[in-house]
Image (cartoon, coloured by chain):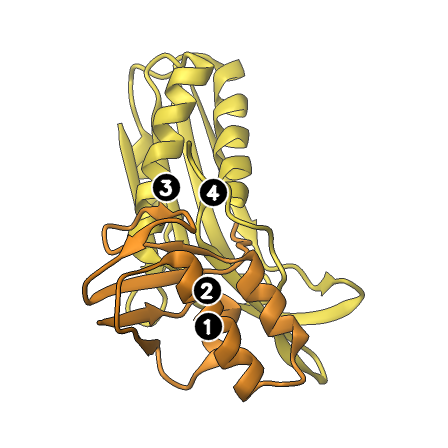
Amino acid sequence: MIIKLELFGMSKEFSKDEFLHFEFDNEITVKDLRIKLEQMIKNEFPKNNNYLEVVKKSAFSSEDNEIVEDNYKLNKDQKLAIIPPIGGG
Amino acid sequence: MFHCDVVNLKISKISLERATDFIESHKCGASLFFIGTVRDMNNEKEVTGITYDSHDKMVKKSFKEIYEDAIKKLKLEHPVAFVEHVKGYVPLGGISIIIAVACKHRSQVYEFSRFIIEEIKKKTPIWKKEHYKGEDAKWLEGQQIQIKK
């Protein structure tokens, strides 16, 4: 199963691309995705605690543009978005 | 009556005229314009511009929900609202958001406009990257999005 994660705000600094791709063998939850993202940050930006903090404080949204909780199940290929802390206006 | 949009500055411009035309109504005795602009200083740094990022679909959905919440909570009569936020680079002094509202009576437009901007700050997925004189640009920390229960 492939989860395509669209990047917004500060999370755009996590990659040169607009999306990150994560592969999982079985059904997961949003919490598992968050952990996987944290692992990626630790590997690729080992000295950047700020990025880790952003991931901790971020929400995630589903393909139908709803914020989903950490226990939301993901069991097929799909696109999600990371919603870091906001600040428009 | 409601209109909202995310204006991608690479292909369009934000327009006060469009807002004025939209909120014009003979049923309303009061109208109010809120215009957000890029100011010159933030956190003691000299700001030269801001790049706005936006989850467009969620932003439009959020604007509509905020409008509907305002009608319910403020018990507005003949509410009309126009909300547009930009996406892309805005130089110092440039417009980032227009909230134009109209209602039957004047007291309601102040409440209505204030409600919309305060809710946007809490619930709408928009991000700012500030550009400074002599320093690297930086994404602002912001606040965790407030989830609708």
Q: CA distance from mark 4 to mark 1?
A: 24 Å
Name the image quarter holding residue A33. bottom left
Q: Find chain A in the image and tell me its colour.
A: orange
Q: Residue at x 42, y 24 (%)?
A: B70
Mark 4: which amino acid?
A: Lys
Q: Are marks 3 and 4 in contact (CB under 8 Å)?
A: yes
Q: Chain of mark 4?
A: B
Confirm whether circles 4 and 1 share one chain: no
Q: Chain of mark 3?
A: B
What residue is pinned by disc 3?
Answer: B62
Q: Tell me which label, 3 or 4, sits earlier in the chain.
A: 3
Q: Are marks 3 and 2 in contact (CB under 8 Å)?
A: no
What's the mark number on residue B123?
A: 4
Say few, some or many: other residues with alpha carbon within 10 Å of mark 2 (under 14 / 14 to 19 / 20 or more).
some
Q: Nearer the viewer, mark 2 or mark 4?
A: 2
Q: How many marks?
A: 4
